[in-house]
Image: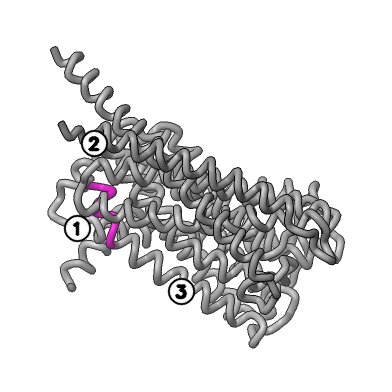
Amino acid sequence: MFDKSRWRDYLLHLFGAAVIVILARDINLIARLPQDVNQGAIFKIIFFHVPMAVTAMTAAAVAFVASVLFLITRDFRYDALAVAVTEVGLAFLAGNLITGSIWGHIIWGQWWAWDARLTSALVCWILYASYLMLRRAVEEPTQRATFAAVWSIFSFIDVPIVIFSIKWWRTQHPQPVFWGGGSFPHDWLVVFLWNMLAMVLLAIVMTTVRVRQENAQRELDSLRRTAHAM
Amino acid sequence: MTGFLRQVAVIAAKDLRAELRTKEAINGSLAFSLVILLLFSFAFDPTGDTTREISGGLLWIVFAFAGTLILNRSFARELPNDCLDALIAAPISGAALFLGKAIANYVLLLAMELISLPVFGIFYNVRWTGQFPELMLVLLLGTWALTVLGTMTSALTVNIRLREVMLPLLTYPVLVPALMGAMQLTMALIAGKPIDADNVMWLKMLIGFDVIYTAVSLVLVETVLVG
């Protein structure tokens, strides 16, 4: 018998196991890489810092698409995806901010600087945190999903404006290694890309688990309502 | 189209008339803006040169804080006697309702700001009249950004828990770029610098912000009000 939900379980577990294997391998490889000439061991934080930022940005885009699709179809599975991916993206952005802060503490001698990228990341974090606050404040499920979708669209439109406008302050953040003309040896790049894959897979697994929770929660709520009605 | 504009005008006139009769939002907002101006004088030395340099930024914090009192009332005013349901059921589009309310809020916010501005100039010894037309342009653009987002959040939060808390919590983060632009421009203008190549970018950004959020709000407000 082909059981669809069990098959999905296997796939999720397989993804989770893949994440653990790839991460273990990456951490091992990163630890063995030679230290950077200028920055020493702390430079290696980039292997987590940048993929986390990329994952968080991807999550914001997915949340936007899911929110638009919810408003068009009124299918609550899109609402579940939007909230799940926003929460996971927020966690990754927090990881990005924390790793950046640790790096700044060592290299700049201060935990925080009001530099363009840092400020933009912080504003985006607060933007999406307020999305989650909004969800908590609305009781009725349809209204919650609708309002949250509208606010997700508002927030996503704001992201490029925030980044663009904050750029007009003097920037202290190092130019991106990959597009800023910096050199990154080939074998480092390979490790970097593997870790990027690990982060994206981790985000997918976490999002899937959260989507299932949301769907289960919705079913529970509707059962409870039915019970009340009887 | 003329029908739409007439509906907008009717809603705006209705809101302004109701506000002029009670004056509850505008009085509260004005009193609040004076209190914040007073409190800032304790936090920063009001006679110092540095305070004068950052005073343009302070001014917008005052406007944003005091403005939420007006914006909070915008849709909440319609709750008693189920006026909101009647408005939604009325044969006008959500966009017309939203735009009418936004225009009423805009007038009230500008009134609050234009009264606060001279008080601020006297308290902090700032000569703000030097580039009056430019300052008014920044005021008009920055206030419209606050109005459009605030009216939208007012519609979003009207029926939810913690309404008074949620409105600023939602509005300010999204408003960050517009507030930054308005602050930078106001600081430059009060310092006597013209709007030139250095900060014309901020002006463009403000205009872009206003246009984008007005358009998105007009498209989405029906969904928010009707569901």
Residue B163 image point, x, y percent: 43, 37
Relative to B199, is B139 above or below? above
Q: Residue at x 62, y 72 (%)?
A: A178
Badge 1: residue crowd in 10 Å (few <14, some 14–19, many ≥20):
some
Look at the image and say whether residue B222 sits in the magenta stretch: yes
Nearest to N terminus: mark 1 or mark 2: 2
Residue at mark 1: B93
Q: Quadrant of the N terminus of chain A?
A: top left
Numbered mark located on residue B82 in the image: 2
Residue stretch in magenta:
B219-226
Residue B155 in picture, x, y percent from top left = 34, 47
Q: Secondary structure at mark 1?
A: loop
**CA gap, disc 3 and disc 2:** 36 Å
* Residue B32 appears anywhere in the view: no
Disc 3: which chain? Answer: B
SS state under label 3: helix
Disc 2 on helix, strand or loop? helix
Which is more N-terminal, label 2 or label 3? 2
The residue type indicated by label 1 comes to Ser
User: Please, is residue A3 above or below residue B185 in the view?
Assistant: above
Compare residues B226 and A119 and report the one nearer the observer.
A119
Q: Quadrant of the C terminus of chain A?
A: top left
Callouts 3 and 1 close, C-beta under 8 Å:
no
Residue B46 shown in magenta: no
Tell which circle, 3 or 1, labels the residue nearer the N-terminal end.
1
Instruction: Find the distance from the CA under tag 3 to the CA under tag 1.
Output: 25 Å
Left/right placement of residue B169 relative to residue A106 reads: left
Disc 1 versus disc 2: nearer the observer: 1
Q: Which mark is residue A149?
A: none
- Contact (CB < 8 A) between labels 1 and 2? no
Where residue B87 appears, as percent x and y from the top left, is: 21, 47
Majority secondary structure in the magenta region: helix
